[in-house]
Image: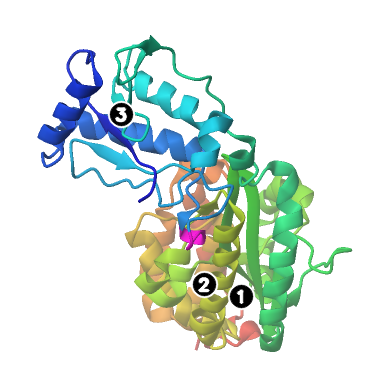
Amino acid sequence: MPYTLRLLYADSPLNSVAEAEAVIARESEVQPKGHLVGRYRSFQAGMVDNCPDLSDDDPNADRPDNAWPHGLPARFDSAVYSFSPNVPMLELGLLGLIAESVALHGLHMFDPQTLRLYRPDRVVIDRHGARSSPPPMERPAIARSALITYDQTDALVQPLKHELATRLAPFGLTPREPGPDGVGSRGFLRRVDRIVQNLQVTATHSHGGVTTHGRWALFVPEITEQWVPPLATEFERYFNAHQKPMGGRVDPFWVYSEDLIGAEGAAFGESAFAHSRTREPLARWFAAYGGHVIGKELPVLDRIGTPRDLARFAQRSLALALETGRDPSMVEAFGLLVLAFCFDRANFAHWHGSLRSINAIRVKTQGWDDPATLIDRLSAHLESPYFDPTRIGGDDKC
């Protein structure tokens, strides 16, 4: 039987262990009221924030750095909330940490093993009625050591990127600008016919853990070459102010997992920023993401090798983006307009109108003023005698 602590609520401080036992007997089968669920939820979140729940990676409940060998559940189906702490950690400050959080949340805690009652006024009552103070609170160092710190991030992430690179290599993906570690920080490249596909995997330390995310950038310079000349002045200002300091590339079409495979890709999609506070979940994310890319995304990307393929794909992804309120960047919008004119002229007016409606305030932060005017100017250029859509394999104007 694991060591168990029980949390309970009373309108005023209880005066004895017997009173606490009576409340527990009466309330154990009772559903918690709204305010009590809120207290328990806040307590649970705060404790896990201080001492991570490693029970998913502790099948034998014997990890010395796991404060909650049997988990600290976020389920509150009883007015008495019971959980089992790591017993050796109790003497390392965990008991004091729990007792302080209990007091802050206006709760009582009963320890059936020692027959001690911890009250919200920070008074501890034993079975004989003697009163004392709770032990000093401290987050145990061994629990802190399980958390990924900022200075540990690179040492943990780079081996995982190496493993990912090894898995991706048979599919033609190689590190972009590899550093001394052989991987670098700019993702993985491969070419499918005329399109360069760049898988970007980011892992940054924030909020006490590592946030990971993946997306694709599709580079098609021949499309960029079609829209830069008619927008030369604006492009120069944009490039010098925004892109030159970032390496000079201006022509990616950003592609997320939802764009490639629909709702099935949401788990690794545009808004899916996984957050791992400890090592094992971080490693699981890299393993799962690698499998997702290989099994789900690459089969779709294999079919996007020419501007015509990209136009066909962009029709679906643009529609999805606009439906979900996700405007493309202006650079993408210019490229999409070129694709529409070259490969989907029957629907060009629809594309033009959709791209013309891009949020002007948002794109101003990208360095572009008056997006509707720029879209109109590019559209006029595409329809003029000076533009030849066959340059990129598009349909002749005749």
- Label 2 residue SS: helix
Please name the amino acid that badge 2 sits on: Glu
Please name the amino acid that badge 3 sits on: Phe
Where residue 137 appears, as percent x and y from the top left, is 52, 23
By what rule are the colours in the image chosen? rainbow
The residue positioned 52% from the left and 87% from the top of the image is 299
Where residue 62 appears, as percent x and y from the top left, is 53, 55
Residue that mark 3 sits on: 110
Label 3 and label 1: CA atoms lie apart by: 80 Å
Quick one: label 3 or label 2, which is nearer the N terminus? 3
Mark 2 Cα within 10 Å, few/some/many (few <14, many 20+)? few
Total count of labels = 3
Residue that mark 2 sits on: 383
Residue that mark 1 sits on: 387
- Label 1 residue SS: loop
The residue positioned 85% from the left and 64% from the top of the image is 181
User: Per the image, is 108 magenta?
Assistant: no
Where residue 67 appears, as percent x and y from the top left, is 50, 43
Mark 3 Cα within 10 Å, few/some/many (few <14, many 20+)? many
- Please, is residue 243 above or below residue 322 in the view? above
Taking the view exactly as shown, the residue that stands out farthest to the front is 128
Q: In which quarter of the image is residue 393?
A: bottom right
Can you see residue 117? Answer: yes
Quick one: label 3 or label 1, which is nearer the N terminus? 3
55 vs 307, nearest the viewer: 55
Where residue 357 appears, as percent x and y from the top left, is 39, 53
Query: Which span of residues is magenta-colored?
Result: 56-60
The residue positioned 79% from the left and 63% from the top of the image is 184
Please name the amino acid that badge 1 sits on: Phe
